[in-house]
Image (cartoon, helix red, strand yellow):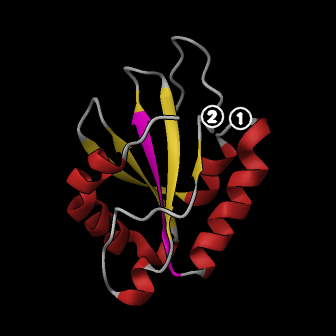
């Protein structure tokens, strides 16, 4: 599993702005490393697009993260064919940002095959 905390740190102000703009809809945030973009997605649709193998686990992690006042961030690394999630509990409740302390990660939640990138 790759460590993307440094990339998340670089995007963190934009991640927080994306979250704040859509917080009422409980989004997931995606950081596209190749495109250098941060996007907020409707959590239900985004999680439903994941592979069957990881969908339920991701739903549970998302629910737990939301209950803890946190943010779920997916890092999309098309160069290495990786989609990896990071959960940051308590970010909203504390009113602080700390991209250095994710609580857990799910590697390759969309089950990408070699050379495949799905949306």
What range is drawn magenta here? 69-76
Q: Assign a secondary structure to mark 1.
A: loop
Residue 112 lies, in percent from the top left, at 60, 24
Residue 95 falls inside the magenta stretch: no
Seen at 34% across and 63% down, the residue is 99
Q: Name above or below for residue 72 compared with residue 34.
A: below
- What separation in Å lies between label 1 and label 2 (alpha carbons)? 5 Å
Please check the rendered image and state whether residue 74 is part of the magenta-colored stretch, yes or no.
yes
Question: Disc 1 or 2, which lies upstream in sequence?
Answer: 1
Crowd band around label 1 with a 10 angstrom C-alpha radius: few (<14), some (14–19), many (20+) = some
Judging by the rendered image, the residue that carries numbered circle 1 is 51
Taking the image as shown, residue 21 lies to the left or right of residue 2, namely: left
| Label number found at residue 110 | 2
User: Mainly helix, strand or loop, the magenta region?
Assistant: strand
Task: Place residue 43 in its image quadrant.
Answer: bottom right
Q: Residue at x 30, y 68 (%)?
A: 16
Q: Residue furthest top?
A: 115
Image mark for residue 38: none
Q: Judge from the rendering whether residue 103 lies leftward or rightward of residue 14; answer left or right.
A: right
Q: Nearer the viewer, residue 105 or 81?
A: 105
- The answer to whether 47 appears left or right of 26 in the picture is right
Residue 76 horizontal/vertical position (percent): 42, 36
Q: Is residue 86 above or below residue 2?
A: below
**Residue 35 x/y as whole percent:** 26, 32
**Residue count near mark 2 (Cα–Cα under 10 Å), binned few <14, some 14–19, many ≥20:** many
Mark 1–mark 2 contact, CB under 8 Å? yes
Front in this rendered view, residue 2 or 92 = 2
25 relative to 108, above or below: below
């Amino acid at each position: 599993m790759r460590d993307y905390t440094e990339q998340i740190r670089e995007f963190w102000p934009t991640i927080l702005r994306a979250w704040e703009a859509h917080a009422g809809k409980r989004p997931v945030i995606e950081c596209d490393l190749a495109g250098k973009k941060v996007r907020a997605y409707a959590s239900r649709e985004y999680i439903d697009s994941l592979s069957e193998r990881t969908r339920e686990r991701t739903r549970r992690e998302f629910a737990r993260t939301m209950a803890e006042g946190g943010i779920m961030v997916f890092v999309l690394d098309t160069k290495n064919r990786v989609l990896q999630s990071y959960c940051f509990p308590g970010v909203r409740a504390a009113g602080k940002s700390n991209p250095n302390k994710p609580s857990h990660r799910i590697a390759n939640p969309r089950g990408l095959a070699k050379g495949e990138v799905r949306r």
